[in-house]
Amino acid sequence: MGTQLMEPIWDLAIVGAGPAGASAALSALYVRPHAQVLLLDRSDFPRDKACGDGIAPHTLDVLASIGVEGIGAGYAGVERLQIGFAAGPSTNRVMARPAFVIPREVFDERLVRVAVERGAELRQHRVRTVAVPVEDSPLVLDGTIRARVVIAADGASSVIRRQVAPPLVRATTWRPSAPRPWGPGPPRARSTSPTTAVAIRGYAPVRTGGAGKQEIVFASPVGSGRTSWPAYAWSFPIGDGRANIGYGELLGPGQPLTRQHLLDRLDELLPGASADAQSWRAHLLPLSTGRPRQPDGRILFVGDAMNLINPFTGEGIFYAVASGVLAGRATMRSAGPDGDPGREYRAALRRALGRHLRHTDAAAMLARSPAIVTAAVRAADRSPGTFDDLVELGLGAGKLTPSALGEIARALLT
């Protein structure tokens, strides 16, 4: 009679092997190189992912902190950013640090490959259930995969979050003495659905004059059948003669957006950009300022599964990598019967991004006003410092600085 091999009890199982999940694996193995780490993803790699493909230098900084170098090899930094309205105002400046445009088919596969090289096991598997046992027994995925800790990196529609989390609540509605989400007792805040944007992305030859700079063009809030604001088109050159181009806008109640509508708006803002474009893909972005609070315990949420998307810009890769690294580190540093990975990760996330996230929430609310966005563009064109501050807020962990707010207020009044 043959001997059946038992599935091991993994130190860490990660659901989703995108940037957040792969970064969590890399971080865990950086802290404990011999840890047993399992990466699960429904897709095989390399695989395409609808995205603007922008990689801020801050993302590469975080990866370098866990010894991961060379992820951007072969892709030159883009130094200039042109941003504004098609009919003005606009600004075109050199960023303090160049950004990169790396197709997700390349970026994600490179991260996964390094994680596997460093000891993680990658398995193509769609996770459907998680069982949370009592006390210190292993967590169980799909009835067979056992792990001491699970990190949910399975996106905005996270299967894990739907099974173990209560409705999303706006953090700003909580009183200091009120029970927290996922904490004991009933929540005292109203549930909220995430503000959602819909976008379409393709690859096209770089437009004349578009090489060497990232372009973001805001739509006018009136005319052309506009029904929502903010909305913008983009063109991000990759460096190989192609650009990642796209258009996105908020999805209002009862507002069906067709592919043709999105493409028409793209061509209106960036004439000729979609000529000879290929690989069109549409996707949704949850831009809510409400985020779940990471619970105590052995299930951690990172990236889109934690609703970590910049509501000011829609940027998510920096958050995915940063939260993944923090979560992976917390799982290894809190190993043992007295450790609490969820509590340690929650505190680390608050220290790293808490203040920044409050500032992006405020910026997103201000950006609902076209007049304020217009003033911000004018202020950025007048002041290099304001331009740098706003780029840092949108791509990294920056804040709404008093000087930038002052410049925007002056531009608003003149």
Image: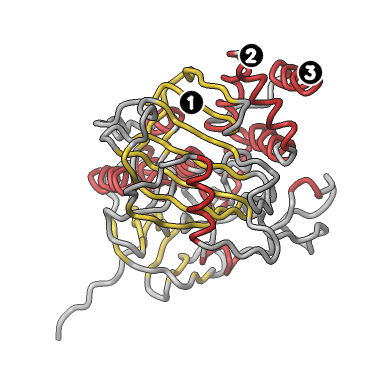
Numbered circle sitting on residue 81: 1
Distance between the alpha carbons at the discs numbered 2 and 1: 15 Å
Q: Position of residue 79 (x, y in %)?
A: 41, 21
**Picture quarter with the N terminus:** bottom left
Tell me if I can see residue 300 in this picture. Answer: no
Q: Nearer the viewer, residue 156 or 273?
A: 273
Residue in view at x 49 percent, y 57 percent: 283
Q: Position of residue 180 (x, y in %)?
A: 75, 53
Question: Which type of secondary structure does the marked residue at label 3 adopt?
Answer: loop
Q: Nearer the viewer, residue 340 or 405?
A: 405
Question: Which type of secondary structure does the marked residue at label 1 adopt?
Answer: strand
Q: Amino acid at mark 1?
A: Leu
Distance between the alpha carbons at the discs numbered 1 and 3: 24 Å
Q: Which residue is mark 3?
A: 414
Tell me if I can see residue 271 in this picture. Answer: yes
Question: Which type of secondary structure does the marked residue at label 2 adopt?
Answer: helix
What sort of colour scheme is used for the picture? secondary structure
Numbered circle sitting on residue 250: none
Q: Which residue is mark 2?
A: 382
Is residue 295 found left or right of 260 in the rendered image?
right
Of badges 1 and 3, nearer the viewer stands 3
Q: Position of residue 372 (x, y in %)?
A: 73, 31
